[in-house]
Image (cartoon, helix red, strand yellow):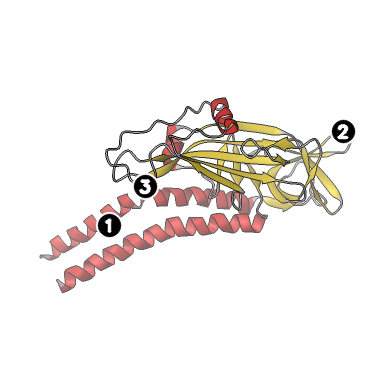
Amino acid sequence: MTSADAVGAVVMVGLAMSVAAAWPIYKGWQRRARYRLVRDTEVGTPDTVTSGNTVLLTGAARTRESPIHAPLTEREALVAVWSVSEWQDENLQLKYWSPEARGLRSGAFGIESGGALVTVPAQTCEGSTTSTTSMLGYDAVTGFDIESTLVEVESFDFTEEIPQAVEPPAQFRTLERKVGLEAPDPGVTLVDLGRKHGARRYHEAIVEPGDTLTIRGTIETRADGENVLAPPERGPMVVSDLDPDTLAWRYRWSYWKLFYGSITVILAMMLLSVFLIAVG
């Protein structure tokens, strides 16, 4: 093999690996943006915040109104987040969970620290995902993004997988209809082994009184002196049961792993090809 052929082979390996690694590199860049958002937002507690500042407010969740009922488990909670994904298996090569719907529900509650409390107004944002999101996933590592809100949880408290041919519990189907999610179809795979196309996986996490919560928003002081956390003036609201340092580290590690890890693999494969050509 001539030197020109060797260089061409190495370049082809690099291009092929770059195409294969395009998705993790893209996801890593997304996580970089999330890491910078968390890193660059001031951290505050209810006893230290200043009106008008956008902060990562952290503290213990406290009841302000009657609790809500989580849509999947029907448990009482201050905050409930849920998601639905569907197993795609219509060919022998491509099998994956696609995000189909997600939502956040909360009544008005408080974040407390140092004897001070900031009120977080009630909110509900729920809906099905777009086809692009179904393919590429969410910006969150464990959670989702919806209506300018990023939900990031340590883990989901509840997970249930239901095959396509099995009727889910009534509250599951009610929730799916509410967000416009139709029942899954059985697919057309000729050889369908293991998990079947159309199976759905349901996740839910809840926040109860006393749980630690971190929320990104802008502090507003009302005429009666009450501090309220409003949506941030710039960038997304963040809702997480992780503390700010852990949240930042999660995004940073995910960014390093996906972005730099993929580049390292590409370079390693190119060096391996050089070695094999040299000894061949």
Could you classify mark 3 by the number of other residues whose Cα lies within 10 Å: few (under 14), some (14-19), or many (20 or more)?
few
Place of residue 100 in the rendered image (x, y in percent of width and height, measured from the top left): 48, 35
The percent position of residue 44, horizontal first and vertical second, equals 75, 51
Q: Which of marks 2 and 3 is nearer the N terminus?
A: 3
Compute the Cα span from label 1 to label 3.
35 Å
Q: What residue type is labelled 3?
A: Gly
Foreground disc of the pair 2, 3: 3
On the picture, is 237 further left or further right than 93?
right
Q: Looking at the image, which is closer to me, 182 or 148?
A: 182
Q: Residue at x 46, y 29 (%)?
A: 183
CB atoms of marks 2 and 1 within 8 Å:
no
> Upstream in the sequence, badge 2 or badge 1?
1
**On screen, residue 119 above or below 36:** above
Q: From the viewer's perspective, is 223 left or right of 228?
A: right
Q: Which of marks 1 and 3 is in front?
A: 3
Q: What element carries label 1?
A: helix
Instruction: Provide residue 142's location: percent of width, then percent of height.
Output: 55, 49
Give the residue pinned by disc 2. 223
Q: Mark 1 points at which residue?
A: 14
User: Which of marks 3 and 1 precedes in the sequence?
Assistant: 1
The answer to whether any part of residue 65 appears in the image is yes
Q: Mark 3 points at which residue?
A: 194
The N terminus, quarter of image: bottom left
Q: Residue furthest right?
A: 224
Residue 131 against residue 44 in the figure, above or below = above
Q: What residue type is labelled 2?
A: Ala
**SS category of the residue bearing label 3:** loop
